[in-house]
Amino acid sequence: MTASLDAASSDTLSALPAGEAEAAPVRPSLLLRAREPLLALIFPVLVLLFWHLATAGRTFSLIPPPLDVARALYDLAFGGINDDAYSRTLLIHLSASLSRVYGGFAIAAAVALPLGLLIGRIAPVRQLLDPTLQVLRPIPVTAWLPLSMIIFGLGPRSAFFLVCLGAFYPILINTIFGVRSVDPRLFEAASMLGCQSTAQFYKVVLPASLPAIFTGLRLGLGFAWVVIVVGEMTGVPTGLGAIIMEARALSRTEIVICGMAVIGIAGFISDRLVLLLGHRLLRWSPNFA
Amino acid sequence: MLEKAADPILELRGVSKQFELQGRRIDALHDAHLRVRKGEFVCLIGASGCGKSTLLRIVAGFETPTRGQALMWTMPIAGPGPERGMVFQDYALFPWLTVRGNIGFGPAARGRPAAEVKDTVERFIALVGLQRFAEAYPHQLSGGMKQRVAIARVLANDAELVLMDEPFGALDAMTRERLQDELLDIWQRTGLTVLFVTHSIEEAVFLADRIVVMSPGPGRIESEVIVPLPRPRSVVAPEFNELRRELAQRLHSHHARKAA
C-alpha cells in the first residue's frame, strides 16, 4: 500500500534544535547544484544513443530512429514538415487528454475523499462497504473496458469513467489509511484540552490525515495518466491515447512514440506541480518539508 | 464550582480498575484512596505495573473506574476536561500546528475570542521561554522544547490540576534537571496543583511535597511519605540522600514481600 507513509505518523524523526533549522542554508556552488540534473540525464542520453545506433541508417527498421521521432513530434506540434492528418494536432490531443485526466481525477477525488473519511471513521460504514471495495479493487481498468463501453457507450463518457476508476482506489485507500492511523494520543490530547468528539473531526482527524490523503491524491493523479490510453481506447477521436491507438493501426510508429513521450512529460510536470503544492501545504510534516 | 478551603481539589475513594486482556482479568489498580489539597505537588512512584499511570488516566478522565469514585472539587470526574491538563511522556503535540498553534489549541477550541487567545499564547510562550521558536513545528524542536510546549499548552488552557505521566522520562539528564527546575518555578509562581508520575526516586524527592508509594500485583497505594525538606532542595544534601535511601528500601521491601 503506502510504505512511505508509515513514517509520517511519527514526529520523532529529527530532533535538531530549531536554531539550526532556522539558519539560512549555505548556497552550494553552481557545479554542485548542477550535479543532480546532470546525473539524471546520463541514463536517458545513453538510451537515446543506443536507440540511434540500433536504428539509424537501416533501410528497414520497425522502430524509427530518434531523429525521425523528433521530427514527427515537431510536425505534430507545429506542422510544416509532413503536412498530413497529424500535423499541428498536438494541442488538440493534449488538451483532450488533459481534460479527461483532470476531469476523471476530480470526479474520483470528489467521491473517494468523503467515502474514505466515512469508511475510516465510522465502523458500520466500513463493515458495509469495505469488503465489496476490496474485491472490486484488484480488477484492472482494462478489464472494465468492455463493460464500460456497454454502460457508457462509445466515446468520452467511457473515457472519463475509466480514468476516474484508475484514480479512485489510490485516493480511497490512502484516505482510509490516513484517517485510521491518526495517533490515538492526539485524540486524548484534544479532549483534555476541551475539544470534543465532533469538533475533533475537523481539528484532529482531517489535519492529521492530510499527508496520507495528499499521497493518495498524488498517486491517483499518476494513475489517471497511466490509464489514459486505455480510457481513450473507447472510440474517442481525439486524445493522446486515441492517436497512439490510431497511429498503431496505420503503422505510424513515430507518432506512437511521440504520444508516449508527451504522456510521460505531461504526467511528470503534473506530478511536480502537485508535489510543489504539497511542500507548501504540508511544511509541518517531516516527510514533505 | 463550589470551593471550600477544606475540600480537597482531588479525592479518590476506593478506586479500582480492572482490564480484560486476552481473556484474563488484570487488577491494574486496587482500592486506591487519595486526597490532594490545592497547591500540593504530589508524586506517584512505583515499579511498572503498580497502577500509577492507570490512576493518572482515571483522574484525567480517559478511563472510568471499575469501582469507587474519583472526585474533583467533590464532583465526580466524568470524562476529560480542561481543568485537568495532561502532560504525556511522548508529548502528543499536534504536528501540523506551530508552537503558537499548539499552545492556542485549547483556548481556541473552547471558543475564546481570537484577541484573548493571542494574548494568552504570547504570555505562556514567554513563561516557558520559547519566544524564538514560536513559529517552529514540533518536528523541528528538541525533546525538552516539545515538553515545554506541552506544559505551556495545558497552563494556557486554565488547568488547575496538572497531570504529568513521566514527562521527563525520555529526556537526557541535563535537560531533565533544567525542566525540573523550571517546573518547580512555574508551580511556585502559579499555585498549581501537580500530580506527577515517575519511576525515579530522586526525581520524586526533589519535586514533591508528598510521595505516594505504589506497588504492583495488584496495583495499589502502599504508603505515603511527606517530604519535609525545605526548598530549594539540594540533591547532594545528607537529608536528601537519607530520604532517598529510605524510599528505595520501602520500594524493595514491597517487592520482597510480593516475591515471598
Image (cartoon, rainbow, N blue to C red):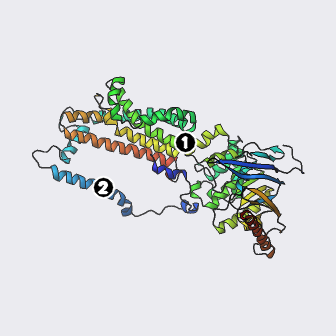
**Which element is circle 1 on?**
helix
Residue drawn at (71%, 48%) of the image:
B18
Please give the residue where the numbered disc 1 appears in the rendered image. A179
Label 1 Cα crowd, 10 Å radius (few <14 / some 14-19 / many 20+): many
**Which element is circle 2 on?**
helix
Which corner quadrant holds the C terminus of chain B?
Answer: bottom right
Kind of residue indicated by mark 2: Leu
Question: Given the image, what chain letter belongs to the residue carrying mark 2?
Answer: A
The answer as to whether the residues below labels 2 and 1 share one chain is yes
Compared with residue A88, is residue A52 higher up or lower down, i.e. above or below?
below
**Residue furthest out toward the front:** B260
Rounded to the nearest angstrom, the CA distance separating label 2 from label 1 is 39 Å
Image coordinates of residue B76 in percent, x first then y, are 80, 43
Q: Is residue A247 left or right of residue B236?
A: left
Image coordinates of residue A220 in percent, x first then y, are 42, 40
Residue drawn at (57%, 38%) of the image:
A121
Which corner quadrant holds the N terminus of chain B?
Answer: top right
Q: Is residue B122 visible?
A: no
Question: Given the image, what chain letter belongs to the residue carrying mark 1?
Answer: A
Quarter-of-image position of residue A43: bottom left
Please give the residue where the numbered disc 2 appears in the rendered image. A41
Residue in the foreground of this view, choosing between A7 and B243? B243
Q: Is residue A12 left or right of residue B127?
A: left
Kind of residue indicated by mark 1: Val
Image coordinates of residue B47 in percent, x first then y, are 70, 62
Compared with residue A174, is residue B152 higher up or lower down, i.e. above or below?
below
